[in-house]
Amino acid sequence: MPRRGHGHYTGTTHPITTDKELDEKGHGRYSDARLRQLVKYLTDAELTQCAHRNRPLRHDGRMVVTLCQGDVSYLPVTETLRLPRLTTTGHCMRQVSANRTSDSWRPQRSSWRRTA
């Protein structure tokens, strides 16, 4: 990304800086606003290209599901869902923590057996 930024902003009075920082959510980003803008533009463009591969504008009724927070150009958001946080074993964290407070919670054992 820094190479693209240097190429894109050649001839500007202030050189591109490639220093990184953390944003308010703790995510890494470039400290140079021009590089951040370039990263956002390219990310949105890639996301839009991927979402349009199944031709939702040509074929009525096609559904595009994105699991991200980026914007998809020409496809308005119709519904936003919150997915549950899962444990490393695939169980819903909210259910596991609620069940642990009661005495009825026990780890489930696998029911399949290998036979020779």
Image (cartoon, rainbow, N blue to C red):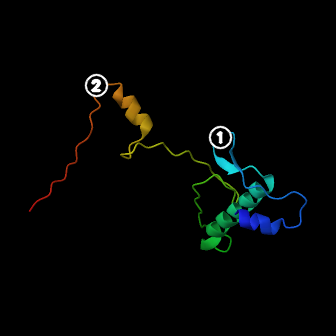
| Of the pair 5 and 59, the residue shown nearer to us | 5
Q: Amino acid at mark 1?
A: Lys
Q: Give the quarter of the figure containing the N terminus.
A: bottom right
Q: CA distance from mark 2 to mark 1?
A: 37 Å
Percent across and percent down for residue 74 are 73, 64
Horizontal placement of 107 versus 17: left or right? left
Identified at 75% across, 49% down, the residue is 31
Horizontal placement of 29 versus 108: left or right? right
Sequence-wise first label, 2 or 1: 1
Q: Quadrant of residue 53?
A: bottom right
Percent across and percent down for residue 104 are 28, 28
Mark 2: few/some/many CA within 10 Å (<14, 14-19, 20+): few
Above or below 79: residue 8: below
Front label number (2 vs 1): 1
Q: Give the quarter of the figure containing the C terminus.
A: bottom left
Residue 83 appears anywhere in the view: yes
Q: How many marks?
A: 2
| Of the pair 34 and 102, the residue shown nearer to us | 34
Residue wearing tag 2: 103
Q: Which mark is drawn over residue 25?
A: 1
Percent across and percent down for residue 27 are 63, 46
Q: Amino acid at mark 2?
A: Asp
Q: Residue furthest left?
A: 116
| Of the pair 92 and 19, the residue shown nearer to us | 19
Identified at 76% across, 57% down, the residue is 35
Task: Determine whether label 2 and label 1 are within 8 Å by CB.
Answer: no
Q: Which mark is drawn over residue 106?
A: none
Identified at 72% across, 51% down, the residue is 19
Percent across and percent down for residue 29 are 68, 50
